[in-house]
Amino acid sequence: MAKDGRCAYDVIMTDPPYYEAISYADLSELFYVVLRRVLTHAPFASVLMDKSNEVVQHIRSDKNRQTEKDKYESMMAAAFGEVHKMLAPDGRFVIVFAHKHPNAWETLVSAMIKAGFVVDSSWPIETEMANRTRGLSTASLASSVWLVCKKRPATARPGWDSKVLEDMRTNIRSMLREFWDAGIRGPDFVWAATGPAMEAFSKHPVVKKANDPGSLTVSEFLTHVRRMVVDFVVGRVLSGDKEEGDAGNDADRLDEPTAYYLLHRHDFGMDEAPAGACILYAVSCGLSDRDLAVTWDLISFGKGKADDGEEPEEADADAETDDETEGDSGGKVKLKTWAQRKGKSLGYEAPGGRPIPLIDRVHCLMHLWKTGELSKVDDYLDSNGLRRQELFKRFLQSLIELSPHGSEERSLLECLSNHVGARGAAVDDSQMKLL
C-alpha cells in the first residue's frame, strides 16, 4: 500500500496526450451530444466536457504557444506525479511516445524529471501500418518509443554536465549499434536513441554546468544526443555500413549541411521526401529547413509547404503516430541536384564567412570538371588540401554509391575520384624520388 492508503502498483503504463494535438475534449463533445440523446437511461451531466483540465497543448490561433507549452508541461508533471505516488518503490512506469518534434521530447522529459522519474530503458516498437490512410501522406513515425522509467531515489544528488555527457555517450554507443543491426533507420533511429541517452540526464534532479553559471537544460542535452546519433549514422553511411565507420571525433565529423545532405540522400535519394522527416534530420544537424533552403540552397519545397522565405512554424515537424494536428508536415522536400546548385560563390565562399561545406566543394569540382578545365580542378584540390583528406575521399565514394548507374552525376563523381587517386599517387611517387 502507498503511504496514503492507496494501492501501490508494480507497473503503470500510459500512452499520454501528444503535445501539440487535437483537443480531445472538443472531439468528445461530438459523441457526447449523440450519446446523451440515444442512451436516455444513462446518467449524463447537463454540462459538456471540462476543457480547462484537458492535458493538451493547443495550437489554435487564439492561443499563446509558450503559455500552452508551459501549461502542458505543468499538467503532465502533475499527472506523472500522481503516477509516482501510486507506483511501488521498485515498480516501473511505461510511457509510449512517438512525437518527432524536439520540443515535444524536451517537454516530456522535463515533466518526467519534475515528477521524480529516471528513464531505465527504452525500445522502439513498430506499431504503425505503412499503408494506413494517415501514413500515406504524412511524415509519421513507423515506430513508437516505449520509455521504461523507475523512481529516482530521494537521495539523488545534482550532476555535472561533463560527467553526464560522458555517461550518455557510454550508455547509447552499444544501443546505437543494436538498433542499427535491428534494421531501424531514418527518423525512427534518431528518436529510438533518445531513450537510452536520457537515463544519464534524468537520474539527477538537476545537472549543473562546470564552466558556466546555471544548469544544463533538457534542450541542450538533447542537442548533444542528436548530434552523436547523426555522427553515428553518417559514419555508417561513409563506411558502407561497416562498424569501423562510426564517427566519434571532430576530425571525422562532417559539417552540418553536408551531414544533412548525406542523411537525406541515403534515406530518400533525389525523390520527394516527407517534410516532417527532413525537418527532424535538419534539427538533428543543428539546422532548420529554412537554413537548408535559403542559406545553403540544398533543398526545395513541394506541394503543402511553400518556400516563401518566412520562418517555418514549429508545427511543420509535429507529426506522430497519434491523430494530432499535422501542420504542414504532409508537405514534400527535395534535394537540389548538383546542376541546380551553380551560384558563383559555390565552393569558394560560405554565407557569413562560415566554413565552406564539403558538399559545396564537391559540387563546385563537378562544375569545374564538366567545363574540361583540369588545371582549375587541380588548383582547387590543392588550394583546399583535398587530395590527402580522407573524409573528402570517403564522402566522394559515398556519393558515387548513392548515384544512379549510368547517370551524368555518377560519371562526373567517378572521374573526380579517379583523378584524385591518380594525381595523389603521382605526387607521392615524385616526393619519394626526392628523398
Image (spheres, rainbow, N blue to C red):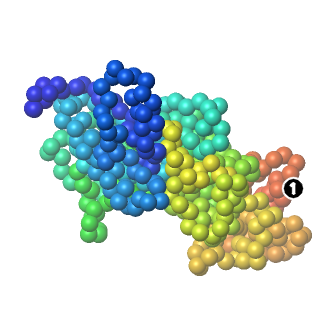
For the point 42% across and 34% down, which residue is it?
A: 33
Crowding near pointer 1: few (<14 within 10 Å), some, many (20+)? few
Quadrant (top left, top right, bottom left, bottom right) of the C terminus: bottom right
- In this picture, is 35 found above or below 435? above
Q: In this image, 96 relative to 335: left or right?
A: left
Q: In this image, 270 relative to 198: left or right?
A: right
Whether residue 210 is visible to the viewer of this picture, yes or no, is: yes
Q: In this image, 209 relative to 336: left or right?
A: left
Residue that sits furthest to the top in the current view:
41
Q: Quadrant of residue 302?
A: bottom right
For the point 18% across and 27% down, which residue is it?
A: 8
Task: Describe the element under mark 1 as helix, strand or loop.
Answer: helix
- In this picture, is 188 found above or below 219? above
- In this picture, is 287 found above or below 100? below
Q: Position of residue 405 (x, y in %)?
A: 84, 46
Q: Quadrant of residue 128?
A: top right
Q: Quadrant of residue 141?
A: top right
How many numbered badges does the structure rendering display?
Answer: 1
For the point 58% across and 75% down, which residue is it?
A: 354
Q: 132 or 33: nearer the eye?
A: 33
Q: Position of residue 57 (x, y in %)?
A: 40, 51
Residue labelled with disc 1: 408
- Tell me the kind of residue under disc 1: Glu
Q: In this image, 85 relative to 267: left or right?
A: left
Q: Position of residue 313 (x, y in %)?
A: 53, 60
Whether residue 383 is visible to the viewer of this picture, yes or no, is: no
Q: 286 or 309: nearer the eye?
A: 309
Residue that sits furthest to the right in the current view:
372
Q: 66 or 353: nearer the eye?
A: 66
For the point 50% across and 58% down, which residue is it?
A: 314
